[in-house]
Structure formats: structure tokens, C-alpha cells
Amino acid sequence: MNLRPRPCKQCGDKVAEYGRLRCFSCLHPELPPPTCKACGSDAHYVGGYCRRCHPRLPYADSCSDCLAWGTWHRHGRCAACTSLRNRGYETGTCATCHRTVPLLKHGVCRLCRCQAQAVPRTWQRPDLTTAATTGQQLFIADLVRRVHLAARTRERGSPEAHQLVGGSFWAMPRWRQESLFIAERDMSRVTVPDVEPIDPAFTAYVSARAEASAEAQGWSPALRERVLRSLYLLTAVHGPHERIKASTVATLPRQRAKRAITRVTEVLAHLDLLDDDRIDPLDAWIHRRLSDVHPEIRAEALVWIRIVRYGGPRRRPRSTNTVRNQVDASAPFLLDCSKRYRTLRQVTRTDLTEWLAHCSSPHNEAVALRNMFKTLRSQRLLFANPARGLSLGPGQPRCPRR
């Protein structure tokens, strides 16, 4: 269908109807123009819609609900406000601006909530009455979330100089000297007065960046003090040329709050100073679950688990719950194979059918085993796939039975 508006062949002022050469007024001069089927206005355009609400033609204007400026393709509303109406949010009078629009939590509209979240917050919750006292700050539609998703860390390149307190400048070193011997540091018994910084300019730079993060994220004064004290201890014993391990950050005094350790790790990661050497809990659980399996069979199973977790050339990575369920379903079979075989190449179709016949829920085990043998066959670790065409059996019911 040609969506380009065509002028009426008779009057030349209005737009011709679909499949016709004349507009509605020229086709039916005795009838008044119909009202818009979406908003009810009398500004008829074509096809029973006004120019603003036409579902197939873009229109640049303010959103009818949140007043944000953008280009609309349906009913004159942005994507967020359209989603609110489609999801059945109750329409009522906003407690702040007193407009009749779909309401969010606490009885406010989306415009007032966006205005409250745009104001720099302290450690309290956003003040939803901000728009009533300071006015509405209009914005570009459908860009609030995209700005957060498009945020990237600064590209690595030439070092950037930062001005410190007192007028001096300091820049991050472009190259790092690797340590010959890496010794573990225990920061649990170190206090601030006992440590003299190796590089005072480096300590001041990290503290300044932490202050900026505290102001942007609205940290409480107590949290800001704990984070600055912890960063002082870490930067006092580390030079600007070495990264700070996450295990070293974990040895800091907890100081009655675990939240400070999390904020310290976030600041160091943002400054590209963190060496995350923490053990993956899922990886540790997998090795514990397969600890009694034969080493060769365990090595083959880990190849399959790695592809399920991180994906492959034509496979997407699966969620943590999926990985846990499939490993938990296949672990008993791998333990049984370890008693008779040394590799999964020796497994036959008879072994699979006999094993599934004695399982209480064979559907989950069959799904995991078919996935495992199919993946290993694609990686050319097996000569043949014994689970090809294996019956999955009845799945678990999703609704309660009588």
C-alpha cells in the first residue's frame, strides 16, 4: 500500500481517501467529516483518523500523555505511554499535575515520575511532588532508557589529565608494570592513621572520582565516609601501575555494612583498577556436582556445560537456572557411566533407554542427555550420537490434577 498522502483531484486542499482520487468531503458533500476513531477530534485526515492518530503515518509532536517530544506512529503517544495503556494501567487524576492519564504507583503519572527521577537524589526516595514546586522539565521521548543502556566506559587511549585540589594535575599511567611476585594483602587489621600513601596524587584522584560518584548516585554521608576510608586504605598500599584484586577488597573491615564493599568495587571497576579474581559460584557448584565423575567423562561433560553457559557459533547462552537444571539432571547418569566406562564414546542407546526407564521423571533427564550428546557430537568428541531420536516421554504437568 502506498502511504504517501495524495492530494484530492477535485479540491486539491485535502488528502484523498484510500483507493480513491477525492477526499471525504468531495466524495460525500452532504455528510459532515467523521470524527477521529482514536482521539475523537473533528480534524479528519484520512481513513477515519486525524493526522496525529493515524496508525501508519509518522507525526512529530508532543506525546498526549507525558508531553515528551518525538515522532509517533500510533495514536500520538510515545512507546512508553502506549505500553502503559496496553497493559491496562488505571486511568485517573494525577496527584501532582492533576491530569487525567494512566497512573503509576503512588497515584502519579509518568511525566511527574520522570521529573522526580531527573532531580539529583539524596539517600531518600525520589520526591514525587517535585513537579508541583519546580515545574515540568520536558524531554525527548523514548530516550530515557536508551541513554542508560548506551552508557559506555571511556575508551582506552591517551591518558587524560585530571585537575586535583590545589591546582596540580595527575593522569593515569598508560602502561602498567607487571609484578614479579604477587603477594596477598590482608587489609582487615589496617587503619587509616597507620598507612602513608605510596602516591598521594593517585589517592587524591581516586577519592575525587568517588566523591563524584557519591554526588551523582546520592550516597548517604555515612556510606560516603566508609567508601572514602576504604579507598584510602587500598590506594595507599597500591601504586597507580597495579590493579587492585577483588579478594583484597573483600578483606577490608566490614564496618557494620556490606554495602560499602560493593560500592568500593564499583568505583574501582569504573576506573579500570579492579582485578576481579572472585570465584564464580556456579562454576564451583558444577565442579562439586561432578567431583565423583571419571576425569575423562568429566572433561567431556565440561565442554558441553561451557557451551550451554556461554553459547557457541550458532547457540545462545542459557540462563543460570537452565544450566543448573541440566547439570543436575545429567549428573546421576554421568556417575553411573563412570562405574562402567572411561569415556562417553562407549555409551550406547541401550544404556540410555535402560537408565530412563528407572527414572522417576524421565522427561528432564532425556532433555539434558539429548542436549549433551548432540553438543558433543557437533564438537566431534563422539563418533555417533546415541541419543538421536530418543523419546522424551511425558512432560511434567503444569496444572494441578484432581
Image: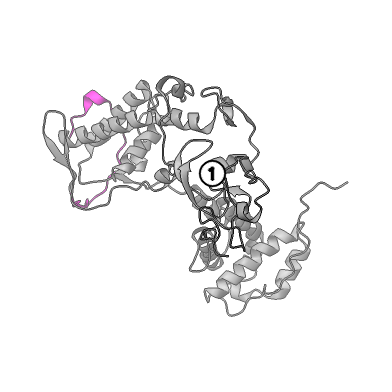
* Quadrant hosting residue 251: top left
Furthest residue in direction bottom, as rendered? 383
* Quadrant hosting residue 391: bottom right
- Answer above or below: position of 136 versus 161: above
Who is closer to the viewer here, 135 or 368? 135
The number of numbered badges drawn on the structure is: 1
- Name the side, left or right, on which 400 lies relative to 189: right
- Measured from the top left, where is residue 326 in percent x and y? 62, 58
Who is closer to the viewer here, 372 or 107? 107
- Measured from the top left, where is residue 129 in percent x and y? 48, 21
Kindly identify the residue that appears in the image at 55 percent across and 57 percent down: 318
Q: Is residue 311 magenta?
A: no
- Measured from the top left, where is residue 161 in percent x and y? 16, 42
Furthest residue in direction top, as rendered? 133
Quarter the N terminus occupies: bottom right
Kindly identify the residue that appears in the image at 48 percent across and 49 percent down: 59
Kindly identify the residue that appears in the image at 62 percent across and 66 percent down: 371
Q: Residues within 10 Å of mark 1 (few under 14, many from 20)?
A: many
- Name the side, left or right, on which 330 lies relative to 118: right
- Answer above or below: position of 350 versus 191: below
Kindly identify the residue that appears in the image at 40 percent across and 35 percent down: 262
- Name the side, left or right, on which 152 lies relative to 282: left
Give the residue type at disc 1.
Answer: Gly
Residue 72 visible, this orientation: yes
Residue 142 visible, this orientation: no
- Answer above or below: position of 348 versus 155: below
Q: Which residue is mark 1?
A: 76
Secondary structure at badge 1 equals loop
* Quadrant hosting residue 365: bottom right
Magenta segment range? Answer: 174-197
- Measured from the top left, where is residue 41 in percent x and y? 60, 40
- Answer above or below: position of 236 versus 145: above
